[in-house]
Image: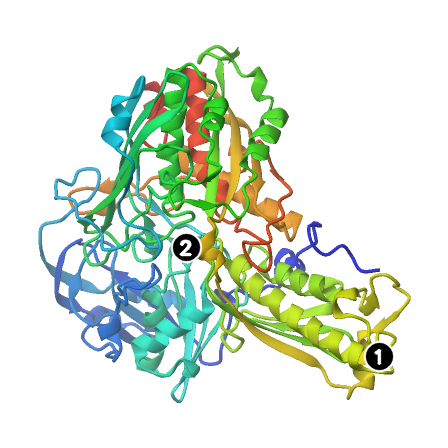
Amino acid sequence: MAKKLIGDPIDRIDGTQKVTGSARYSADVKRPGLVHGVLVMSTVANGTIQTLDTTETLRLPGILAVMSHTNAPKLGGMDKNKSGETASDRVLHVFQDNLVHYNNQPIAMVIADTFEQAVEGASLVRVTYATEPVKPGLPTSTDKPLTPPRLPRVDDQVDTTRGDVKKGMAGAASTLEATYKTPTQFHNALEPHAVLSFWEGDKLTMYTTTQGISGYQKRVAELFGMPKENVRVITQYLGGGFGSKGTTFSQAMLGPMAAKLVGKPVKLVLKREHMFGMVGSRSATVQTMNVGATADGQLTAMTHDTLAQTSAFDEFMEPAGTITRMLYACPNLATTHKFIKANVGSTSPMRAPGEAPGVFALECAIDEMADKLKIDPLQFRLKNYAEEDPHRNRPFSSKSLRECYQQGADQFGWSKRAKQPRATRDGNYLVGMGMATTVYPVNRGESTAMVRLNTDGTVRLETGTQDLGTGTFTIMNQLAAEVLGLSPDQVTLGAGDSKYPEAVGSGGSRTTVTTGSAVTQAAQEVLKKAKKMAYSDKKSPLYAVAEAEIEAKNGRLESKSDPKKGESFTSLLKRNGNKPIEATTLSKSGAEKETHSMSAFGAIFVEVRVDEALGEVRISRMLGNIAAGKIVNAKTAKSQILGGMVWGVSMALHEYAALDTRNARIMNPNLAEYHVPVNADIRDIDAIFIDEADETVNPAGVKGIGEIGIVGTVSAIANAIYHATGKRHYDLPITVEKLIG
């Protein structure tokens, strides 16, 4: 008897390797003749390199070369340094000139026989600069804001207006204006970026840390000016990505350039401090919200104006206002987006780019307006519930947000919440409860998958996807197995390698949506071929049985009305040439993108305890109730939501980059001083999924869940702190100093 395939908490197929330490990540891979590269980073934020003295370095034993702008291989594709088409195409710094655009920019690489020799050699490189004035960025910048040419998602307008905002505000019984600030935050996945590169003639192989194997392959080939077929990219395991490894940053090119320079395999692993600049960051933002509502709680008008920070040499706009456009039934609404340029490393996607900072502002403003009107925050949200998308004027493919509100409120005990802030105390702690809506759009790209039903009844699945550590490989097997009526352990997967069919990058919560749909469609095509073989075969028990009457179950094809009438895949194939049945399918968006609005929705509930004297915040309970279409694997899905909620704790209470505005240098580039949550910070945390069937959203019937966990958690925590203390906080993170100040 096959296991239930979809929805059960099935163990991950890579679990044993990870817990036993036998999993080999990119930095663990070895190669004969391997040598090591270590980067030299700039110590100024704006200027040019005048001299780069490597004399002492080259005297050391084991030093093979120092690669810099003076001797780096020239790249034929650098005229396409940034295509500007996607958020993944960032401008790279790969030693093609002597310009410095930000502090901690890579400017040279020491290559040596051992890692230790390379580290020592890098410490001895001496650099002089001609410096220029520094643009420190938000919040101190006085530069005129610029309007971005586009937002990262091609279907999102930069600025929008509907109705008459001025008239809507004039008709409001109560209005609110508030400004919310979010800081620069840096990617700190457990696994630093790493790449092992080696050349065999004109062919390049790279073991690397990437969220997008196929995109990485294309980008590297483009910049080298070579056919993509000559570049092979392998990511067997990934220790977290969260957006940073979705973008092809400078190390992706510096590794193979160094390998070409010295004619040996080169391993380049970034130090923790190197990740504070060269591999992306979440933009700092200043967001102004204006909200108007009637006395009984009906929104009349709203504006959301975002000012974000981007780098001086590149452009990425944090799309913070996009959720405000569609979440509530507000007739008069306007959103704007502008950025200022600064001498910082590339700003880029970080888990829920746009939504995480934007919903913090939106849901805190909604909460404050509810408080001004003396309306329960949950009831205020229900009062302004959008039955259809008011921005696109389209129905939702599915929306179970009411159920998320209701079930979450019942389980969390929301009805017991004190109406007034500062009303509940437990010893030294003020106790507060807060909630927020969470939402994330369904993003779908293009992916190809190959499914082959073998003559022994097993299945081979191949697709060039990667597993960020979230369980992607496991659920791809589940999806193929579900269609073909098999147990997941009867499916073997080929993935994590660019030699397999091209797949979308794992960003924007789109892997299962896109690649999962490709797997589902390819498996459906195989099943269709098998059914046709059966009902066309006079020797089959299913001969002349209607295709719709045949189903796959337990490794067999059988009649739905008479399960005894059927046969195994093995016997069917053996009688019909003993050859596998195979299908390769390209999956991409269809008409649903133009006819429906598609998002996952949820509600986050939080209880906090605040020691007013010490400024200590303890989050005692967190609950996420999520509606995200079909849940393929309950275990991996819940882990995704919990992980996102923990990141919400980090964003609300811990993370920020301390900037020295004199030289735009980050002063806390390490995990000792750049704080993120640890186990002691997380207590009672849970996530529950609402059953939601969506036959419109995509063939797999799924919605993304990688990012929705963080989105509403940040504002739910801020709202809970207000309920506990009676004081609103508009500037993240909410630290001890701000609580007692």
Asked whether 416 or 441 is in front, the reply is 441
Task: Answer few, some or many: residues within 10 Å of disc 2's Cα (few below 14, many 20 plus, some between 14 and 19).
Answer: many
Image coordinates for residue 249, horizontal then vertical, percent? 34, 63
166 shown above or below 465:
above
Q: Residue at x 18, y 53 (%)?
A: 45
Q: Secondary structure at mark 1?
A: helix
Seen at 63% across and 72% down, the residue is 461
Number of numbered discs overlaid on the protein picture = 2
Is residue 402 visible from the viewing direction of this image?
yes
Give the side of residue 46 with respect to residue 307, left or right.
left
Q: Nearer the viewer, residue 335 or 392?
A: 392
Quadrant location of the C terminus? top left
Residue on which disc 1 sits: 571
Q: Tell me which amino acid carries mark 1.
A: Ser
Where does the N terminus fall, quadrant-wise? bottom right
Residue 62 x %, y %: 35, 75
Q: Find residue 502 and report its horizontal and vertical position in percent.
A: 49, 73
Front one among 345 and 466: 466
Left or right: 696 as drawn, with respect to 527: left
Q: Residue at x 41, y 50 (%)?
A: 188
Q: Residues within 10 Å of mark 1 (few under 14, many from 20)?
A: some
Corner quadrant of residue 284? top left
**Tag shown at residue 243:** 2
**Mark earlier in primary sequence (1, 2):** 2
Q: Is residue 561 above or below residue 405?
A: below
- Is 409 left or right of 538, judged from the image as shown? left
Residue at image point 22% right, 53% down: 103
